[in-house]
Amino acid sequence: MAEAGDLAALALESGHPERFVWIDEKGAMADIGSSPADPGVYRKHDLRIPPSVGWSTLHPRAQQLLADVLLLLNLTERSGAVEDLEARLERTNRASLPPCPAEDRRPLQPERTVGMPGAAEPGSTRLRDCPFELCPYPPKGELPRAELREPFCRRQRALVAVHSLHRRKALWQGMTDHELADFRTAMATRTRTPDR
C-alpha cells in the first residue's frame, strides 16, 4: 500500500520512526503509549522504536493505517479451519483493497455477537461481486487476532470528526465522514461490558 511506503519515508526523514511505523500491530494497538524517550539518555534496550511506544504516539496517518491493517488481519485470520484460512489468504493476495474498508463498511456488521441469528460465515454479507469474501467482521465473542479496543476506536472516530479542524480521512477511505464515524463508534462499543 502506498500509505505504508509514505510513512516509512517520513520515519526516515524525520528521524522519529516511532511516529510513523510500528513493530507489531497487536502490540501497538494494545498499548496507549508514552512519550518517545530522550535519545541522549541510556536505555536498557537498543531498539529504534522503544517497547513503551503505543498508538497514541503515532502520527494520525499512521493511526488510521494501523486501524485498517488490524481490521483486515482480523477479517483474514479469524478462527476456523486451516484450509479456510489458507483460502482467505489466497483471496486477499491482490494489489487492491477489499471494498469493505475502502468503499462501504456496512457489510462488516461490527455489532454482531456470537449466537445472533443469521449467517456470519466469511463472505455471507459481502458486497456484490466482491472477490475477497471476508465480510462480516468476526462477531463479538470470537477472538480475532486483536479486538480493537474502545479508546483506540474512539480516537479513530475523532480523526474524522465533523467539528475537528484537522480532520482528514485516509486516502483509501472512500466513504463519507459520517459513515466512517458511525463505523468507528460501532467498533468502539464492541468491547464494552454490558451493565448488570
Image (tube, rainbow, N blue to C red):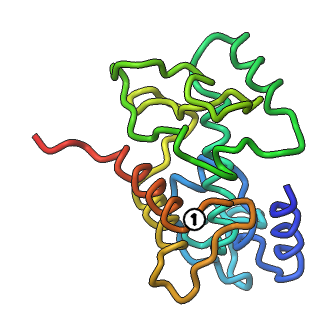
Q: What residue type is labelled 1?
A: Thr
Above or below 123: residue 179 = below
- Crowding around mark 1 (Cα neighbors within 10 Å: few <14, some 14 to 19, many 20+) is few
Dot 1 corresponds to which residue?
Answer: 176
Q: Which of these two is toward me, 162 or 38?
A: 162
Please give left or right for residue 145 compared with residue 72 in the image: left
> Residue shown at 61%/49% (left/top)?
104
> Residue shown at 56%/54% (left/top)?
29
Q: Is mark 1 on a helix, strand or loop?
A: loop
> Residue shown at 45%/41% (left/top)?
110
Q: Which of these two is toward me, 158 or 162?
A: 162
The count of marks equals 1
Q: In which quarter of the image is residue 171?
A: bottom right
Q: Which of these two is toward me, 25 or 113?
A: 113
> Which quadrant: the C terminus?
top left
> Which quadrant: the N terminus?
bottom right
Q: Quadrant of residue 135?
A: top right
Q: Position of residue 186 (x, y in %)?
A: 40, 50
Q: Quadrant of residue 48?
A: bottom right
Q: Where is residue 194 in the image (x, y as percent from the top left)?
A: 20, 42
Judged from this view, the residue extending furthest toward the left is: 196
Above or below 164: residue 79 = above
Q: Where is residue 63 in the image (x, y as percent from the top left)?
A: 62, 65
